[in-house]
Image (spheres, rainbow, N blue to C red):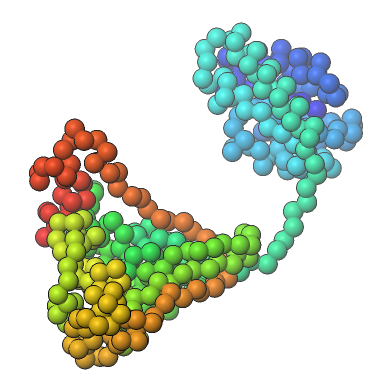
Amino acid sequence: GVYVCHCGLNIAGTVDVEEVAKYAATLPSVVVSRDYRYMCSDPGQDLIKNDIKEYGLNRVVVASCSPRMHEPTFRNACQEGGLNPYLYEHANIREHCSWVHDDKKINTEKAKDLVRAAVKRVYYHEPLEVKEAPVNPNVLVVGGGIAGIQAALDIANGEKRVYLVEREPSIGGHMIQLDRTFPTLDCSECILTPKMADVGHHPFIELLAYSEVEEVSGSIGQFKVKVRKKARHIDESKCVGCGICEEKCPWKVPSEFEMGLAMRKAIYIPFAQAIPNLVTVDPDLCVYIQSNGKKCGACIKFCEAKAITPETLLNQTDQIIELEVGSIIVATGYDQFDPSVIPQYGYGKYDNVLTGLQFERMTCA
């Protein structure tokens, strides 16, 4: 059965719906074709239900507005008429036709094409049955920027277990690098750091900073996830974030957090408000690691908490953590465009040519 909706004048104003319905009646396997002023109304739905029973319809097509609005409506009508709701197809002749063209003749021909395609498509539909499956209430949030932080807090406040995975040593994302934020022009850190602290102390959030998702298997409701927790080369249970090791470390490289405008040490905390407040050792820069314990060792000497030892520096390796969750939220943010690919801008050649985030770091109080 094919049903063409007038939708008042939304469709009928620029489409000859009666002609479309007559055309649909000539298509193979179509035994009934109607046009009606408002198919979504109760009388319109009754047409579908009654025809299913009277003609024994085994497929239904409705040509009307967006399926986002009324596909569930017509599926329910099919089900109430005794037809599997998935043996239904929707042709959008409003947003895809009547609203985007002015010529009624052209619109009518296009509507015919859309209906013909829907009739052909519904032929291949198979009856489906809705099944219920157990859902693990735990949630994985990938990305520790403002979006991931807020998502984690919202879910955790509903007393659901949340695993928040962030690839950098601290959560905060790009927002923590900004000076002020639109529209209030409030201090970015003033808005974000309380939320970061809430994440760090929330009883329903397990923060996996300096970690990356390695593998996801399973399906909605029952995901199995492997997360690689990268080695910080310290004893996290003992580190108090005092920063003495960072102060004593003699080796420096440009800071990623400061967008290369300042330096960081081989052992470092990315910024003062970092969560978790733990140091991270850069194994590619640490001379002690690179020399296999033969050089430097200043951080070991000055760490009063004994969080840094030859064992942690030389032998600590990444850990693979296995999680079971029912839902995954991807909030991985964005990367900056590399302006050096446009040489005429002079980025990297002139000191006063900066990226947006570099300018933010310069102006941040």
Quarter of the image with the C terminus is: bottom left
Does the rendering let one see residue 273?
A: no
Q: Quadrant of residue 178?
A: bottom left
Q: Is residue 106 above or below residue 122?
A: above
Quarter of the image with the N terminus is: top right
Pick the front one: 80 or 165: 165
Location of residue 335 in the rendering, given as x and y in whole percent from the top left corner? 33, 50
Location of residue 321 in the rendering, given as x and y in whole percent from the top left corner? 50, 74
Q: Quadrant of residue 37?
A: top right
Pick the front one: 166 or 206: 166
The residue shown at (27%, 38%) is 341
Does the rendering let one see residue 13?
A: yes
The residue shown at (53%, 21%) is 99
Q: Quadrant of residue 327?
A: bottom right
The residue shown at (59%, 32%) is 66
Q: Is residue 225 above or below residue 238?
A: above
The residue shown at (25%, 73%) is 286
Location of residue 180 in the rendering, given as x and y in whole percent from the top left corner? 19, 54
Pick the front one: 88 or 322: 322
Location of residue 55 in the rendering, given as x and y in whole percent from the top left corner? 89, 30
Pick the front one: 6 or 96: 96
Q: How many dots with numbers?
A: 0
Q: Is residue 304 above or below residue 94?
A: below
